[in-house]
Image: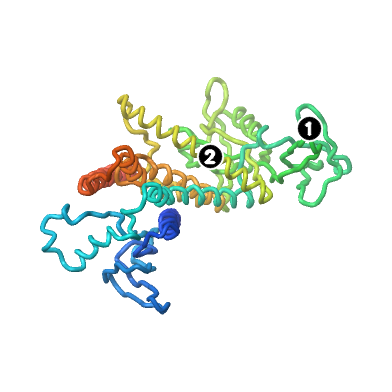
Amino acid sequence: MFSTIIIFGLILGVLIFVHELGHFMTARRNGVTAHEFGFGFPPRVVGFVKDRNGKKKIIFGNQEYFGSRTLYSINLIPLGGFVRIKGENAVSEKDIKDFDKLSDADKEYVRMAKEPDSFSVQPIWTRFKILVAGVAMNFVLAWALISIVLMIGAPEPLDDSVGDFALFGLESVFVRHNEESYDLSHIKDGYVVQKTGGKSVLFGHIVFDTKEKTKKITTLSMPTVMIESVQENSVAKQADMQIGDKIISFCKKEECNIISDSSDFQKFVGANTDQEVTIHVLRGKENIAFTMMPKDHEGRGMIGVSLADITIVRYVWYEALWESFMRVISLTVMIFAAFGALLLSVFTGGGVSAEIAGPVGIAMMTQQMRDLGFVYLLQFAAILSVNLGIINILPIPALDGGRILFLLIEKIKGSPINQRIEGFVHSAFFIALLGLMLLITIRDVVQIF
């Protein structure tokens, strides 16, 4: 469990750090001063800043710093990072009651908000770019992570969308595609041919270019049978089978058979109603044996799992970059659709879906992904990154999207919004969001126990 907490912290830290890095780089690029860019959250342990002569100055502890040169700090809580941009939360002197009673440092901080390198005096378009840059970086990170996954090898269902396969001798290899055969006997290095059952099997995703009349293959691994879902109160659930378990073999008494595809497994289970069988699975790197008795369901044995024939698909780097880009777009559309369905459910009295997770729920999912393997962790981090980007761009005060909403109002209104009012709205929604997160976390804890 400790390792899961560390991994969850690292993933969350990277997502937040990259998000804040987007704000920081865009602010600097547009001539806006960033007082501090920190790794982790305060309290500050140590910070480094260059003076006008280019010499490094070290600042220990939480000493206040509002200089024109960025202080790079290391902070005590190693979860992500933050950036303090000059004038980001600007207020004017007239909006502060008893301004004269403030310390000289606080007075100077308020006045600095009106200087040329302050966020608050920038044109609306510049402020928009700075605010949206964090979200953009989350999408860039997701694209990079999925690209790496596709180059390493990504698990995908073995269906028509993956490719067509051949079961012929090596000397004359053909692949069926759209009811036609194509000679691939001129196989070059990089194509994967594996022998199984005395035959040679070419695994490849065939891409046909009618103009060039060429064929290229994205390499695949031997397919495996993986559990996609486990029904509640089923035989499999009681035996503690889990999503992601790869089924290796099934045994009845002393006779064992290797699983070649999901239909093999379904036939075996269906033919052994109310009989004791042993199913061997691979969970991560661990081999586990489950002994159970399939239950009768409409004349067939069932254990309560849905299966998928999975293969590992590897893309060459230039194909991986494009495929990853398309998958990020598809993932974004799916998440927006899910948010839409959630809002519709809330406003029509359907309640909040149990699929929404807080920090505890995400940590539990991190443990599941860790057990499945490194590639699954990278995919999970990419999904979280897209989620973080989408949540932040929603027009909710206290989030980047809420601040952009106020920019839009300012553009329509033709003048800045009262900073005290805007600050109050952001603070109120921030408290509300914290309360919502607390409720979701409590629900996650209750579900665990």
Q: How far across and down, in percent of the image, does residue 21 sit?
A: 43, 58
Label 1 crowd bin: few (<14), some (14–19), many (20+), radius 10 Å = some
Q: How far across and down, in percent of the image, does residue 282 sit?
A: 58, 47
- Quadrant where the N terminus sits is bottom left
Q: Looking at the image, which residue is at 32% across and 29% down?
A: 346
Determine which residue is flagged by label 2. Answer: 329
Determine which residue is flagged by label 1. Answer: 176
Residue most extreme to the top = 298
Residue most extreme to the right = 171
Is 198 left, or right, of 318 in this rendering? right
Which amino acid type corresponds to the residue marked 2 in the rendered image? Ile
Q: How is the image coloured?
A: rainbow
Q: Looking at the image, which residue is at 65% across and 36% down?
A: 158
Q: How far across and down, in percent of the image, does residue 355 sit?
A: 40, 37
For mark 2, give the secondary structure.
helix
Q: Separation of disc 2 and disc 1 at Cα?
A: 31 Å
- Displayed quadrant of residue 9: bottom left
Residue 218 visible in the current orientation = yes
